[in-house]
Image: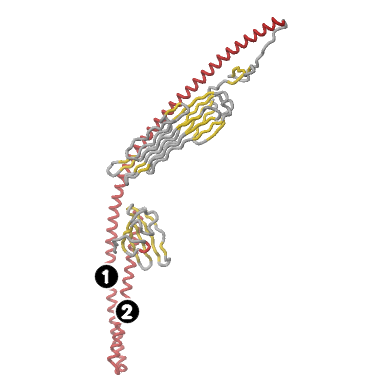
Amino acid sequence: MTETANPIDDLDNAAAGMHGFDADTQNRPPQMSGGGIILVIEDAARKTQLVVDDANAHALWIRSWRTDESRWRRWKLFSSMRQINKTITARIADALETAINGEVEDRRAAIVAAMEQEAAARQTAIDAAVGVERAARESALADAARQRDDAIATAIVAEANDRDNAIATAISGEVQQRTSAIAVETAARNSAISEALAGEARKRTSSITAAVAAESDRRTADIEQFDRRVTASVAAVASGVRQDIEGLSERHSADIASLQGLVAAAAAAEVEKNSIGVRELKIAEPTSPNQCITSNSDGALTWEARVNPSPIMIRNFTTNESIVLPVGSKAMLIEASGGGGGGGARTYINQRGEDGTKGGDTTVILENSPINMLAKGGQAGSASINRPGANIVSGSRGGDVYDGGGASGGKGNTHYRWDDDFYSGGDGGPASCVTKYWRHNDLGGKRITVRIGHGGSGGAGRASPGIGGYVRLWVW
C-alpha cells in the first residue's frame, strides 16, 4: 500500500493506496469543508474508497465503484466505531481473499503456459534433429514426450499446490495478526474517546448548570420587580378611581341640594306673583345603581354612570394589533415595554464573534387623544471577550418612564477550553418601560393601535435572544 506526498486533484481518479487531499480536491464528501486522507482498496469486481475528515477524526466516509454499474455510489457516513470496525474488517477480508484468489489463478495460468511453451519448443527441436528418422521414431518419441510431459505436469501441479498452500497459510496468519492489532487499537481508541467525552460532558454540564441558575435568578428578579410595579400601579389607579367616585358623590349631592333650593325659591316666587299655586319640579328616578346627576349646556338634568371601580377589560398584547375600546369606558392604564437586546456570541477556536441585535421599539397611539407612547428596545450584546452587558437605552416618552425596567435582554454565550479557561460574549440590555393613566368621559369607541418591538437576535454560537416587547391595558 502506497501513500502519496502531494494532495490529489479529484477523488474519482484516486489510485489504489493511501493519499492525502485538501479543500480544493473535487468530489469530496458533501459535508466536508476541508481536507482529509483517502484509502483506496481495488480488486477485479469493485473499488472502495474510505475517507477520514481532518476536522473530525471520528467521522468516516465510504463509497464504492462496481464494474457492472460503471459508476460511483453516493458517500455514506459512519457515526459508530463498532460499525466502522465491522465494515473495515469485512472490506479488508474481501480484498485479501480476492487478492489471494487472483494471485493463485495468475500463477497457475503462468505455469501452464510455460509448460505448454516448453513442450512445443522441445517438440520442434526433436523434429529438427530427427529429420528423416522422424517417421520411424515418431511413435517412440511421442511416447517419451507424453511420459515426460506427464512427469513435468505432475511436478508443476505438485509445486503449484505446495506454493498455494504456503501462500494461503501465510496470508491467513497475516490477516489474523492484523485483525488482532486492529481490535486492540480500536479498544484503546474507544477508551480514550470515552474518557475525553466524559470530561467534556462534565465541564459542559457544570457550565450549563451555572448559566441556567444565573438566568433563573435574573428572570425571578424581573418577575418580582414587575409584580411590584403592577401592584403599585393598580393600587394607584384604584385610589384615583375611589377619589373620583367620592368627589362625584359630594359634588352631585351639593348640586342636588342647590337645585332643590332653586326649585323652592322659584315656586315661592311664582306663588307670590300669580297666586295660582306651586308647580312641582320632578326628576326621573335613576335607571341603574352607581349613577349620578349631570346637566348639559341647555340645563337638562340626566343620570350618568359613575366610573366602575373594577376594570371592564384587561388585555395583554404581544403582537401588533388595533382594537376599539368598549362603550362606556371612562379611564385606562397602559404599560408598554420595548424588546430586550440579543446576547453577544464568542468562539474560542478562531477568536471570531458576532454581536447580538438591538431590541425593537414599542409604540401605543389612541386616536383623537394625547396618548402617544414610545418604549425603547434594549441595546445589543457585544461579541467582545468578557465585556459587560450593554448600556441602558434612553429616549422613551409618553408617560412615566422606567429606563431598563422592561423586557430582559438575552444572555451572552460562554465557551470553555480544555485548560478550563472560557470566553464569553456580553449580555443584551434590558428594554425601557412606560406607564400612563388617563381618565376621559368619551373613551368608549376610540381606537387604540399597538406596535410591539421584537426581541433582539442572539449572536451565532448559542447566545440567547432578548425577550419580546409587550403592552398591558386596563380599562374602567
Q: Along the line of sight, which residue is nearer the eye, 266 or 251?
A: 266
Residue tagged by mark 2?
Answer: 113
Q: Earlier in the sequence, mark 1 or mark 2?
A: 2
Residue 95 in the image, given as x and y percentages of width and height: 33, 65
Q: Is residue 330 left or right of residue 141?
A: right
Q: Residues within 10 Å of mark 1 (few under 14, many from 20)?
A: few
Q: Along the line of sight, which residue is nearer the eye, 319 or 449?
A: 449
- Mark 1–mark 2 distance (CA, rounded to whole Å): 22 Å
Query: Which circle marks residue 166 in the picture?
Result: 1
Residue 352 in the image, given as x and y percentages of width and height: 34, 45
Query: Which circle marks residue 277 in the picture?
Result: none
Residue 183 in the image, given as x and y percentages of width and height: 29, 56
Quarter location, residue 460: top left
> Quick check: 19 above or below 424?
below
**Element under disc 1:** helix
Q: Amino acid at mark 2?
A: Ala
Q: Is residue 316 left or right of residue 136?
A: right
Q: How is the image coloured?
A: secondary structure
Q: Residue at x 28, y 41 (%)?
A: 421
> Quick check: 71 above or below 215?
below
Q: Residues within 10 Å of mark 2 (few under 14, many from 20)?
A: few
Residue 56 in the image, given as x and y percentages of width and height: 33, 52
Q: Is residue 158 left or right of residue 75?
A: left
